[in-house]
Amino acid sequence: MRSFIVDKYAGPLHEAETPEPVVGDQDVLVQVVAAGLNQLDEKVRAGEFKQILPYKMPLSLGHDVAGTVLQVGPGVRDFTPGDAVYGRVRDGRTGTFAERIAVAESDLAPAPRTISTAEAASLPLVALTAWQALVERGKVQPGQKVLIHAGSGGLGSMAIQLAKHLGAYVATTASGSNADFLREIGADTVIDYRTQDFEEELSDYDLVLDSLGGENLEKSLRVLAPGGKAIGVSGPPDPTFARTAGLNPVLRVAITALSGKVRRQAKRLGVSYEFLLMRASGEQLREITALVEAGIIRPIVGKTFPFTQTPEALKALVRGGIRGKIVVTNP
């Protein structure tokens, strides 16, 4: 079958003929109709996460999928051929930039009936990240103040909608040209990062979701109220992550050192920092499906590319400037 692969870390994404997927006992074979692109795809390609997400090369990229069930393993109970499904495939089983993929049943959910397949493909990774950051980790309550960076991106636009649904007061950073759009989807305060310093404008926030890292993360700690929490999805990884991921002792020491500065700053300020590498979950996707079908969350697809132009789609993701998500389609 046709797939898009990399032969080595930092190598170019290119088309190749690859073997048909092997369908295990608990697997679902999906005909890929659409695949969402994520920053994680580029980070994996570039080798930025190779210490914590090691892959053998050559590697087929792609984490988000929406499509049609072709076949199910003998242990599968919830899906049958012909079902419309979507999901974020688990780490170690990437490959949605392909014609077909075998996905663990527990990573999939029935696709929302009220949106297109391309829109469904845009959701899984960013919606699950938002859910795990705001609901699981942040435990956001009505009336709390939440800051979400890069609000017009795929994760930001999803997290704003979910935070607003949870009853939070939502601030976000973005370019001024996106301000009206961001207010429309639920932002109460929009900080134009080109002309304003969010650290000077905001204070006493309960939670920050940071997708940028570096100096942006350090400044985010200073806008938190005492006891507040910053959750970072770009790093640095923290010791708790290293422990739960089962990383070897040498890597654990290295990761402890990597996040040491941020964790010390957080402690001095009376706040906390956590690293989040989201996980696949069909169960949580069912919760998200309900919100989509109720009109509470809507997918934001900024641009679509045909399957044959998947490398160009990844380059567009790297360039940035596209509102919401990029999706490749292979109807």
Image (spheres, grey):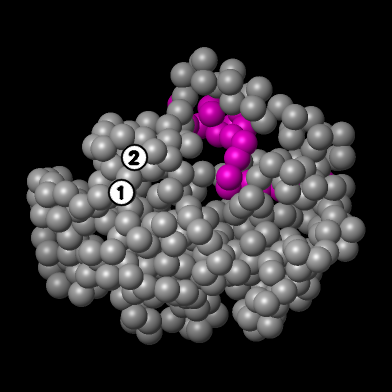
Residue 306 image offset from top left, x and y in percent: 27, 70
Q: Disc 2 on helix, strand or loop?
A: loop
Q: Amino acid at mark 2?
A: Gly
The crowd level at tag 2 (other Cα within 10 Å; few <14, some 14-19, many 20+) is: few
Relative to 254, 273 lies left or right: right
Mark 2 and mark 1 in contact? Answer it, CB < 8 Å: yes
Relative to 296, 203 lies left or right: right
In this picture, is 48 found above or below 146? above
Residue at (76%, 76%) from the top-left corner?
A: 188
Residue 67 image offset from top left, x and y in percent: 24, 68
Query: Is residue 292 in view from this perspective?
Result: yes
State the image quarter where residue 206 is shown: bottom right
Residue wearing tag 2: 11
Residue 80 image offset from top left, x and y in percent: 15, 66
Q: Amino acid at mark 1?
A: Leu
The crowd level at tag 1 (other Cα within 10 Å; few <14, some 14-19, many 20+) is: many
Residue wearing tag 1: 13
- Magenta part of the chain: 227-246
